Image (tube, rainbow, N blue to C red):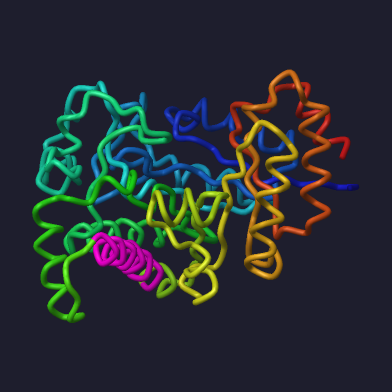
Amino acid sequence: MSGFRPEVWVPSKELVSRESLSRMIERLDEINAVRAYIQVVNRADSYYSSNILPPAEELVQDFDALQMTIEKACEREFRISAWMNVNLVWGFGKQRPFSESHILNRRPEWITADESGNSMLKYPSSNLEEVFGPYIDPGIPDVREFTAHIASEISNYDVEEVHLDFIRYPFKSFGYNPLALAEYRKWLNKEELIESKKSFDRFRICSITRQVSMISEVVRAKGKKVSCAVYDDYSERAVSERLQPWLEWLESGLIDSAVVMAYGNEPDEVISRVEKIRSLHGSLKDIRIGLGAFNYAGRWDEFVELIKRVQKLRPDEITLFALGSVDEELRKKLRAL
């Protein structure tokens, strides 16, 4: 375990000013990070110089946070993954974005809808796990093109890879946007299929996969790699509930790495799910294991033991969520590994 170097997700709240960004770099140094996922697109807004997205409202200074991170990291040894939330574009319980150019204001017809035809724009909240706000619908071709353009823009920066999060449907009960349903009927005719629950699931899985493919194509054209944050329960939470067949993407070469969100707060459960993924894939090659540090506050010895157990399974890397959860006590324990 000597010389353990974690990866770490860095949420956009660490990038709102030059001062907060400088502190973030110092904290990455303190834990000897090998990779930082820098969140440069949070809710269809930007923490870099974009011609597509408006600047994030949370920014307290007008600056290019991604470029400043790159410049500060140039003399250090950690790699940078530019992290973008793909289909999640806003939050519940918030007023509309101030910017007229925000996609929620510019293309409200792109927001996905539920089985009753209700747009997520009408939702005040959701009781579904990890559904934090409205999503754009990947069943719409213009949506897929929009997200590919964002990824292409980010790829102009000197980063190792573009990291995709929320590259999925919010839940299987969504995807009923009228524009997407029109595409579904065209797809049925092309595939010579009849309308059914099974065919609609297949259409939505194909839509997400096409979105990944388009993003991967433009990112790799600029010499960068693609990784995705994905669910740890492959058959149920990933494929069945969120229509996210990430093992297929990995095995077909659409993505370079999968970063599994193994955030469970019971170590045995985490290990069980990671072992199941290893069994499905044959190994943990090109698979990074993301651990939810936030679930182990006050239980750092238990968390460190979990890291050791995961390491024995030989994943590509181990990723911590998130930087803000790494306190002084955990920093010391990570440095001692």
Total number of numbered labels?
0
Q: Where's residue 305, x and y in %?
A: 83, 37
- Image point (63%, 36%), residue name: 264
- Verify whether residue 97 appears in magenta: no
- Verify whether residue 198 appears in magenta: yes
Q: Which residues are magenta?
A: 197-217
User: Image height check: is 68 above or below 265?
Assistant: below
Dividing the picture into quadrants, the one containing residue 135 is: top left
- Image point (31%, 66%), residue name: 202
> In the rendered image, is residue 76 in sight?
no
Dividing the picture into quadrants, the one containing residue 256 is: bottom right
- Image point (27%, 45%), residue name: 173
Q: Where's residue 303, x and y in %?
A: 76, 32
Dominant secondary-structure state across the stretch colored magenta: helix
Q: Where's residue 213, x and y in %?
A: 37, 70
Q: Where's residue 158, x and y in %?
A: 49, 59
Q: Nearer the viewer, residue 89 or 235?
A: 235
- Tell whether 72 sits left or right of 41: right
> In the rendered image, is residue 188 in sight?
yes
Q: Nearer the viewer, residue 187 or 320?
A: 187
Question: Which quadrant holds the C terminus?
Answer: top right
- Tell whether 248 sits left or right of 196: right
- Tell whether 306 sits left or right of 177: right
- Tell whether 94 sits left or right of 185: right
- Image point (37%, 39%), residue name: 42
User: Image height check: is 18 above or below 253?
Assistant: above
